Amino acid sequence: MKRKLLLSCLLVCINLVLLNAQDNTRNLTLYHQYKPAEIKMTNGKVVKTAFANVFLKNASLLFKRGDATMEATMSTISTVDIGKHHFINIDNMLACEVGIVGVNKLYCVTLLDLDSYKAMLRNDVNITNLSIGDQLSYTTIDLTPTEGIALPLIRQYYYLLDGKIVRAHERELVRRLPKEKKRIYKTVISMDSFSWVDAESLLKLLEAISE
């Protein structure tokens, strides 16, 4: 148990810098600068790019081709590694691995608040459909700077629980858990410090229901 807790805490320290450092952003991408990435396709092929990022509008993969910014077709992507961060494709969104407890994991999808995004940036992003054969499919994107505009972020959390992806939500989890784990589950979520939008709380819950 101590080893599991230590591993989870270590991963939280690494990833919360990225995922919880701010509640709003002036960028349309997760990273300020594009970074090298390794992309595993659904057909098993591995593609590498020197300049990758995550589009906060829909948590899709962006990459550079010359001076152009491309948005990959997410249905063709399985996993992405950008720097030290590992992402998996959940509902065509890149979800970052936040912590591990045994075989179970916690993931986070970071997105712009779409209502605010549409209100403030309507007509600022132009997309043109393109394709590059049997490798990455993508669209070109013109990312307009958002100087002076603080865009709110929302985070959606997911568990990989016993091999299945489950939204970290009260109704979803209570239906999935076996009877013998529901008591500890209810105990954890009833704590005053618990929050469904806090990575530390969700990792503690994952540790409890993974016993």
Image (spheres, rainbow, N blue to C red):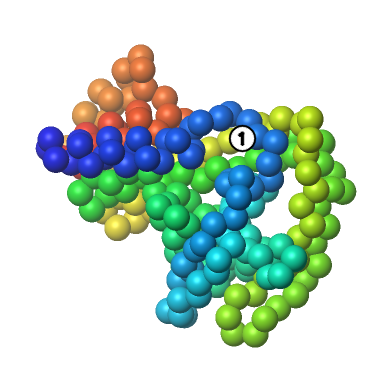
Residue 146 placement (x, y as % from top left): 78, 39
Give the camera-side residue of 161 and 121. 121
Q: Residue at left 51%, top 31%?
A: 21
Vertical placement of residue 117 versus 131, above or below: above
Residue 153 placement (x, y as % from top left): 61, 35
Q: Is residue 48 left or right of residue 122?
A: left
User: Which quarter of the rendering shows the N terminus?
Assistant: top left
User: Which quarter of the rendering shows the C terminus?
Assistant: top left
From this viewpoint, is residue 90 visible? no
Vertical placement of residue 44 versus 169, above or below: below
Q: Residue at left 21%, top 29%?
A: 184
Vertical placement of residue 203 versus 77, above or below: above
Residue 32 placement (x, y as % from top left): 61, 45
Q: Residue at left 63%, top 31%?
A: 24
Residue 76 placement (x, y as % from top left): 55, 72
Give the camera-side residue of 4 and 156. 4
Q: Residue at left 30%, top 58%?
A: 163
Residue topped by disc 1: 153
Q: Which residue lies most toward the right here?
A: 123
From this viewpoint, is residue 191 visible? yes
